[in-house]
Amino acid sequence: GAVVSQHPSRVICKSGTSVKIECRSLDFQATTMFWYRQFPKQSLMLMATSNEGSKATYEQGVEKDKFLINHASLTLSTLTVTSAHPEDSSFYICSAKPGQNYNSPLHFGNGTRLTVT
Amino acid sequence: QQQVKQSPQSLIVQKGGISIINCAYENTAFDYFPWYQQFPGKGPALLIAIRPDVSEKKEGRFTISFNKSAKQFSLHIMDSQPGDSATYFCAASIHGTSYGKLTFGQGTILTVHP
């Protein structure tokens, strides 16, 4: 089945530094990928929609200069948390959908646990 | 109007029992309703999904019941097993326009006791 790979799975960084998270669709092309954020024991909150070859669409309240998204190819989207602060510590999850087929489901990566110290 | 409300927040079931999780939505434009299972430290995995043109879908021990008029749908896990202990999320999306952009429920922590 379709596999979405996310890297790294865990990252610890110091306050003020930037962190890049990669999301790859391993066996399918994804023109669109989604980035979610999840706090402990809470639901997934959509941050942005990543479109290959164009600018990402951010949800209301998500700072686009803080969370930089690049979708340079049909199999790779990256999320960069710039000037990270402790409140950015969270579980970040990407997802992708194979093709444009109405019936193809959304597949999620295994997430990246970001801890900002 | 984009909300999906999920209940209960947590559920404890004995092995072999039936687990039932409910969701309700407001936006009648939603046309795709998946359920996801998430284990600690992992991403959600698709369990089963339904479209509003059917009232029930069954896959193994998992069944979705859908009530379009009430704008409600539920997940039933038959013969619940300790390995089913996880967090379950219902979700909804408008396939035609937002191409898989999901709105998630709040999640239900299921614990199945042996």
Image (cartoon, coloured by chain):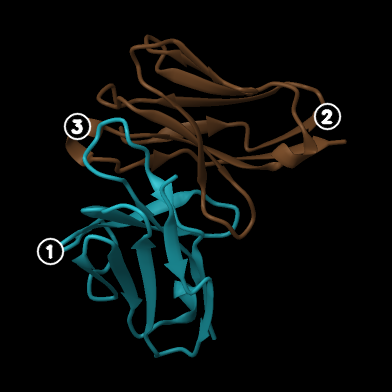
Residue A93 in sight in this render: no
Image location (x, y in percent) of residue B77 = 66, 25
Image location (x, y in percent) of residue B49 = 44, 28
Q: Amino acid at mark 1?
A: Gly
> Which quarter of the figure is the N terminus of chain B placed in?
top left
Q: Are marks 1 and 3 on the same chain?
A: no
Residue B15 is marked as: 2
Image location (x, y in percent) of residue B19 = 69, 25
The chain that hosts pointer 1 is A
Crowding at label 1, few (<14), some or many (≥20) Cα neighbours within 10 Å? few
At x 57%, y 57%, the residue is: B42
- In this rendering, would A49 be left or right of B45? left
Viewer-proximal residue among A67 and A79: A79
Residue A53 is marked as: 1
Chain in cyan colour: A
Q: Amino acid at mark 2?
A: Lys
Image location (x, y in percent) of residue B52 = 35, 16
Residue B96 is marked as: 3
Chain in brown colour: B
Viewer-proximal residue among A102 and B32: A102
